[in-house]
Amino acid sequence: MRANPIHSNVLGILAACGAAAAFSVIDVTFKFLSAAYPLYQVVFFRSVVALALLLAIIIPLEGGYHILRTRNVKLHLMRVTAVTFANICFFSGLAVLPLAEAVAIGFATPLIVTTLSVLFLGEKVGVWRWGAVFVGFAGILVIVQPGADTFQPYALLPFFGACGYATLHVLTRRAGGSDKASTLSFYPTLGFLVISAMAGLAFGHGKWVTGTPIADLVLRAWAWPVGIEWGLFAIAGVSGAVGGYLVGQAYRQCEAGLVAPFEYIAMPLAVFWGVLVFAEWPDRSVWLGSALIIGAGLVSVWRETRTPGPPTRPRPRSSG
């Protein structure tokens, strides 16, 4: 019996909205916890919870543990490297920038994918998508304001993070769809666990602390969570596993052009969390830049559905 396309589209849209909500929860928990805990510790606890959910529930539902076998070992190692770099940059920026500003700059991922796909995959890009790239970068410049008195070098961190996520997506295209979504999610999550554990062993004693906030985000000593903070670590892990699974399901259910716009609800959610939790209200440059980036991203995704090749994820987030 053929699946009802309307039913599939509704499920895909709901999955995309759920993924965007889950990713926004990760953002707010990371930003909240980064005030007291080093980045490697937050990533470690999140990875433990996410990996446990993948192994206990998601992978068995996707077909069993045999799907973890892959012929793309070297590719997955490169993906782990790219997404680790992306996470360090994005979440470091998230710790020192207003939530909505960091999230808005991170939305540059699909625009950067367009550029990288030309350079490394030999894809053809027309006037529409090149125009979207330039408009999107204009939006980033509006937010970052290079050369202005209000320019913050830290604003470049989520941009570098978007570059890392874009590299991840280009490498995923190289896989040619041979691995399942849960397999693609498993290896970066395992990589996060190993790398964050190694960082904890290297920096957990706190002897490398410099007094510089952005450096100490990584070099700060390990501190055991207390009270409600255990719950926040668990929420970050569950949100990561659920968000990664839902976004994969969304793009399996329906076309990227239909799903992608619903992922952009992460922007108003970022504003909501920023105001509610951190008393941060975006200024006019963030609103204008966000409109340019999101509009350009939607045009880029729309063009993706009219040309051959796998769809580009518009949302910069870690796998798993």
Image: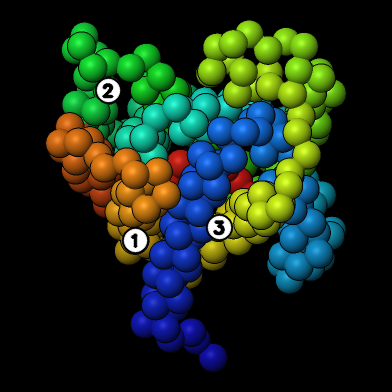
C-alpha gap between disc 2 and disc 1: 25 Å
Of callouts 2 and 1, the N-terminal one: 2
The answer to whether marks 2 and 3 mark residues whose Cβ atoms lie closer than 8 Å is no
Give the residue at mark 1: 262
Residue 68 higher or lower than 93, as above or below: below
Q: Quadrant of the N terminus?
A: bottom right
Q: Examine the image and state in which quarter residue 197 appears.
A: top right
Q: Give the distance between the C-alpha atoms of the residues marked 2 and 3, in whole angstroms.
A: 28 Å
Under circle 2, the secondary element is helix
Query: N-terminal of the two: label 1 or label 3?
Result: 3
Instruction: Report the mark closest to the observer, 2 or 3.
Output: 2
Q: Is residue 279 left or right of residue 179?
A: left
Residue 79 horizontal side relative to residue 191, left or right: left
Tell me whether the residue at label 1 lies in contact with that at label 3, contact meaning CB atoms closer than 8 angstroms.
no
Which residue appears at 77% of the width and 48% of the height? 48
- Which residue does the numbered mark 2 point to in the structure image? 144
Nearer to us in this view, 299 or 16: 16
Residue pointed to by mark 3: 243
| Mark in the foreground, 2 or 1 | 2
Circle 3 residues within 10 Å: few <14, some 14–19, many ≥20 = many
> In the rendered structure, which amino acid carries the disc numbered 1?
Phe
Please tell me which residue lies in front, 63 or 162: 162
In the rendered structure, the answer to whether residue 94 lies left or right of residue 217 reads: left
